[in-house]
Amino acid sequence: MPERSAEVTAEVLGRGSIYTLGTAAPVLAQLAVTPFVARLLTETTGYGQVAVALVVLQVTMILASLGLPSVITRQALLASGGIPGARSLFRRGAALTTVVIAAAAAVTPVATWAVPGTTTPTWLLSVLAAGAFVVVENAQALLRAQDRAGAFVALSAVASLGGPLLGLVLLLGVDRTPASYLAGLAAGYLLAAGLAALQCRGPATHRPGDLGAALRMGLPVLPHLVALYLATGALVVLATARFGSAAAGRLQLAILIGVAPTVLVGALNNSWAPAVYRLPQDRRGAAVEHTAADLTGLAALAAGGVTALAPWLLRLLADARYSPDELVGAVGIVSLGSLFAVGYLANVHLVFASGRTFGLALATPTALVVGLLVAALAGVGSLTGTAWGYPATYAALAVLVAGLRRRAGGPGWREARLLPGLLGGVVLVGLLAALPSFGAGAAARLAAAGVIAVVAVLRLRRLLRPGVAARPA
């Protein structure tokens, strides 16, 4: 049994890394263009408007998806309709998304009044881009079930690179405003949506009741997905209300770097979830336990590496106007969220496999409230303190979803096996965050980053060899 469980880790980190790269591509693309966007917009308030618009885009995308990206893969692998049934869900989901986007555009006057830092052009462009990206997400869910890794990555590349690059072109050649960048983003996502439709051609089987069943499973996930995204997005809005748009733009830069380990863990979900679904139920608990312990250790190393390199990464993203060295602590704090994200994902796979997802509609918003309370209290007079809301949200989420897994009757596993990686990660990040960003402290940071990189490579090599990585459960 340990050997078989180790094979899941090897699958997730091996062939699954293709999906990981495809899923992480949007964040990588945003990291690549952010230094240029932040410098081309003449004031930090201009970048603050972009930061808020990206929050609007993500939240609208989640709502307009109706939860179907979370269901399509499961339906293709576990439901009787198989791939043709999932393809039918993709097409009908696109039609429903169009209706939701039209409704979001209709409430523009109210939205620009209610959401700080939003204008009519930025709102409309954000919701248009969101609708296009939903089509991409649904297509990726289907491609993942079909194990079409090449098509998955190609689609991700067009969506991730096309939009930001077109936005950058418009900033350079048309007008240096937030609306110009968002117009390019929307155009790139629309192009990717057209490609998604082409990649999902083929026979579709519509079975009566399939769409209703998918919506019953997907809709309760919407509060979960919105709250999950707002673990970062709400912090930007909170910072806007408390410290102003310029400060929110600065915090968004720190979050963009700090969430990198969590993005890595979440991207692995694209191969982890199908690997769990394909296993017989009596093997899922052991496999989840083994893989979660391995990924927690890797997340600790990733969080430590990002924290060590935070001063240079921040200076790469932003110039002196943003006071990047003052944001190093916020990067370290945000990176801690990845340590708790592994435990959450491990249990949420088992919840989805059970089909009993309604509890997520309550658990994740509750975790978000906990995180926002922590952010509000820790952020009194401190932009850096606001960042504590992110790991607090994921810590609460890991506990609550573990309870949901038990209520859903999912297979049990020993969550205590995550503690060594979790505690080690907290200590590592804490020590590195305390180092100065100059002089001997900077040298120590670089040395620590080098050691972490070597240890991570050695660890990955071991995990990719199941016979060696296996250990008694």
Image (cartoon, helix red, strand yellow):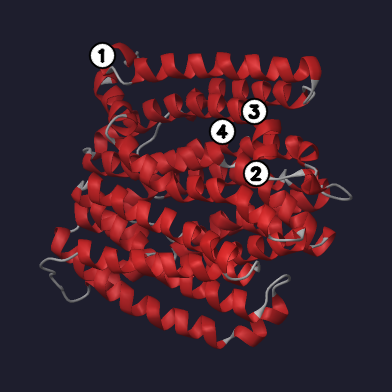
Three-letter code for the amino acid on which mark 4 is drawn: Leu
Which quarter shows the C terminus? top left
Q: Earlier in the sequence, mark 2 or mark 1?
A: 2
Whether tag 4 and tag 1 are in contact, CB under 8 A, the answer is no
Q: Nearer the viewer, mark 2 or mark 4?
A: 2
Q: CA distance from mark 4 to mark 1?
A: 26 Å
The residue that label 3 is drawn on is 309
Residue 179 position within the rendered picture, expressed as x and y whole percent measured from the top left = 61, 72
The residue that label 1 is drawn on is 467
Q: Earlier in the sequence, mark 2 or mark 3?
A: 3
Rendering quarter of residue 203: bottom left
Q: CA distance from mark 2 to mark 3?
A: 13 Å
Three-letter code for the amino acid on which mark 1 is drawn: Gly
Q: Earlier in the sequence, mark 2 or mark 4?
A: 2
Q: CA distance from mark 2 to mark 4?
A: 25 Å
Which quarter shows the N terminus? top left
Rendering quarter of residue 111: bottom right
Q: Earlier in the sequence, mark 1 or mark 3?
A: 3
The residue that label 4 is drawn on is 339
Q: CA distance from mark 2 to mark 1?
A: 42 Å
Look at 78% across and 36% down and name the residue there.
325
Residue 87 position within the rendered picture, expressed as x and y whole percent measured from the top left = 20, 65
Look at 26% across and 44% down and name the residue there.
277
Three-letter code for the amino acid on which mark 3 is drawn: Leu
Tag shown at residue 317 = 2
Number of residues whose C-alpha sits closer than 10 Å to that of mark 3, classed few (under 14), some (14–19) or many (20 or more): many
Mark 1 residue element: helix
Q: Nearer the viewer, mark 3 or mark 4?
A: 3
Look at 66% across and 40% down and name the residue there.
334
